[in-house]
Amino acid sequence: MTAFSVFFCDQERCSIQPVRAMDPDHAIDQVRRQVPDLRRVAVVPDELLEGVDPQQLLREWVQARS
């Protein structure tokens, strides 16, 4: 299993959920079970986030799609 960060927005908020999954689709499925009303979603392998502030990346992701 690989560590992923799932960036998502639902009707109320945007957030990041860390998960361990087989692949990006499996990671989304795990978050969708907890947050059935996903509006936007992106998956990033944690190894690509080394040295990156995930909260800042979340803010930039939200602003880019607003």
Image (spheres, rainbow, N blue to C red):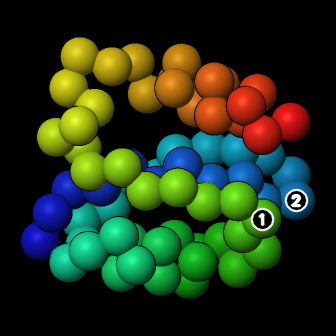
The answer to whether residue 24 is above or below residue 6 is below
Q: Is residue 29 left or right of residue 26?
A: right
Image quadrant where residue 1 sits: bottom left
User: Can the viewer see residue 10?
Assistant: yes
Q: Quadrant of residue 37?
A: bottom right
Q: Is residue 30 visible?
A: no
Can you name the residue that lies furthest to the left here? Answer: 1
- For disc 1, the marked residue is 39
Q: CA distance from mark 2 to mark 1?
A: 7 Å
Residue 51, compared with residue 39, is above or below; it is above
Q: Is residue 31 above or below residue 50?
A: below
Lateral position of residue 5 relative to residue 55, left or right? left
Residue type highlighted by circle 1:
Arg
Residue beneath the point at 86% across and 52% down: 12
Residue labelled with disc 2? 11
Residue pictured at 65% horizontal, 25% vertical: 59
- Image spot of residue 25 (x, y percent): 40, 78
Q: Residues within 10 Å of mark 2 (few under 14, many from 20)?
A: few
Q: Position of residue 39 (x, y in %)?
A: 77, 65
In the image, residue 64 sits, relative to residue 43, either above or below, namely above
Q: Position of residue 20 (x, y in %)?
A: 24, 65
> Could you say which is closer to the camera, residue 13 or residue 40?
40
Q: Quadrant of the C terminus?
A: top right
The reply to whether the C-beta atoms of the residues labelled 2 and 1 are less than 8 Å apart is: yes
What residue appears at the point 28 percent right and 32 percent down from the top-left corner?
49
Tell me the SS state at disc 2: loop
